Image (tube, helix red, strand yellow):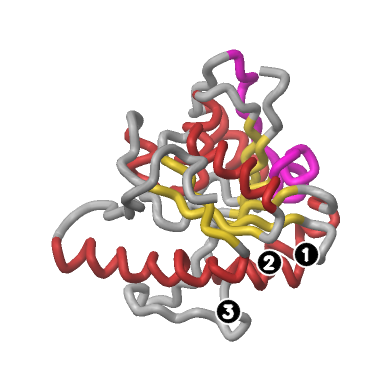
Amino acid sequence: MQDRPTLAIIGGTGALGTGLAMRWAAAGYPVVLGSRSREKAQAAAREIEPGNGAPPVRGDSNEGAARAGEIVVIAVPFSSHGSTLDEIKAAVAGKIVIDAVVPLVPPRVSLVQLPAQGSAAQMAQAQLGDGVRVVSAFHNVGAAKLRAGGAVDCDVLVFGNDRAARDTVIALADAVGTRGIDGGALANSVAAEALTSILIGINRRYRVDCAGIRITGTFGSAAGK
């Protein structure tokens, strides 16, 4: 649909990136997958079925996808977070960048190990500059649930210093079958990023798959703003 922004997913061939791409393409959003290998991104794009009038999903390099996207999602491992931001910095000027990166440090990924800067999202904002509206989201939703189809019994906490940008990302969270919840300023992203390690530990100890979170006492994605 023409009124929906083009979404570029950097790290779009990974588990989370692919899951988000499948959901947004099915919901009618134009999607471009970015990867260090353009050929790998193009192959992954051909496997995703668009819906609701969306054009075919495209694949490109990280930089090419970032230039094509009106909203850019970062879904890469923490180990390549900084280098990826450097690669796309010029291409995302003036845009909303959704940072879904969690500072997991192998092998102890169930142990909270936040960076000295506070969070991956704060690192992204500092690296990309004030001209980019960084919003932090999608840390606590399991990629396998996104890829499985159907409703996802999970809330997505959304953080950012620009309220309009947060509202945009909340709508995108709703579009993938989750419920977007306004978590306030970008500095609060430390809570969701840390919670990911805790959820990984819960998955292991309780032998469950893709544990998520629910915020009780709210009604709809606009509650609590």
Magenta range: 53-71
Disc 3 marks a residue whose amino acid type is: Gly
Which residue is found at the position 65% from the left and 27% from the top? 30
Residue 58 is covered by the magenta coloring: yes
Q: Which residue does the numbered mark 3 point to in the structure image?
A: 118
In the rendered structure, which disc, 3 or 2, sits on the residue that comes first in sequence? 3
Helix, strand or loop under label 1: helix
Which residue is found at the position 55% from the left and 50% from the top? 225
**Res. 83 mark:** none
Report the side of 69 relative to 210 (left or right). Answer: right
Which residue is found at the position 45% from the left and 50% from the top? 156
The residue nearer to you, when weighing 21 against 125, is 125
Helix, strand or loop under label 2: helix
Disc 1 marks a residue whose amino acid type is: Leu
Residue 139's spot in the image, x, y percent? 46, 57
Helix, strand or loop under label 3: loop
Which residue is found at the position 74% from the left and 55% from the top? 133
